[in-house]
Amino acid sequence: MSATALLALCRGKGLRIATAESCTGGLVGAWLTDIAGSSDVYERGFITYSNTAKTEMLGVNPVTLEAHGAVSEQIAREMATGALARSQADLAVAVTGIAGPGGSEHKPEGRVCFALAQGDDVTSETIEFGALGRGLVREAAAEHALTLLKIAAER
C-alpha cells in the first residue's frame, strides 16, 4: 500500500490517522508526511521508543509492560488505544518489535507486533519478518502498518 493511496482513501472517507511507533522510529509518519497536503489526514504521530515514553505519552500500563514486555500484542493494543485517545484521529496504528540486531529465544529479531484501533474496536497481530537486518525489518513493518490502515479505512 502506498502512502499516497492511503491518504487519498482516507481523505475520501473523511478519516484522520494517528501513529504510535516504537521499532519503526517514526518511519510510518515520515512516509505519510513525505506527501504534500498530508496534514488533512495525518493527525499526529507518537514515537515511543522507550518504555517510559510508552507510559507517559500513550498511557501504556507499567503492569502490562512488566507482565508482557514491550514487544507484545498487549502493548501494541495499549499503544494504539492510547494514540487514538490522545488525538483527534479516527484510526490509530501501533508498531512495536525487535528490528535487530539481536533478540532472544523468546523474542527473536524480526518479531513485530501491530495493533489498529478504530473507535472501540482494537485488533492486533504479530508478524515474524525474520532476521532481515534492521533496515529491512523496519521497512517491512512500516509497509504492514500502512496496509492495516488501508484495511481499516476500507471498512
Image (spheres, grey):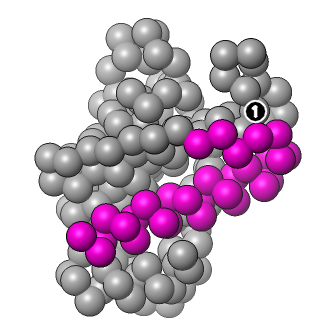
Q: Where in the figure is residue 144, as x and y percent of width and height?
A: 55, 59
Foreground residue among 14 and 62: 14
The residue positioned 43% from the left and 9% from the top of the image is 67
Local secondary structure at mark 1: loop
User: Height in image: 50 above or below 154?
Assistant: above
Query: Which secondary structure is most common in the magenta stretch?
Result: helix
Residue kind at label 1, given as amino acid type: Glu
User: Height in image: 135 above or below 129?
Assistant: below
Specify whether residue 80 is in view. Answer: no
Number of labels in the image equals 1
Foreground residue among 5 and 39: 5
In the rendered structure, the answer to whether residue 103 lies left or right of residue 47 reads: right
Foreground residue among 135 and 40: 135
The residue positioned 47% from the left and 85% from the top of the image is 5
Q: Where in the figure is residue 113, as x and y percent of width and height?
A: 52, 39
User: Quadrant where the N terminus lies?
Assistant: bottom right
Residue stretch in magenta:
127-155
The residue positioned 49% from the left and 27% from the top of the image is 72
To which quarter of the image does residue 77 belong?
Answer: top left
In the rendered structure, the answer to whether residue 149 lies left or right of residue 91 reads: right
Q: Where in the figure is residue 80, as x and y percent of width and height?
A: 34, 45
Residue most extreme to the left: 120
Q: Which residue is mark 1?
A: 109
Specify whether residue 104 is in view. Answer: yes
Q: Where in the figure is residue 104, as x and y percent of width and height?
A: 75, 18
User: Quadrant where the C terminus lies?
Assistant: bottom left
User: Height in image: 152 above or below 94?
Assistant: below
The residue positioned 39% from the left and 41% from the top of the image is 124
Residue 142 counted in the magenta span: yes
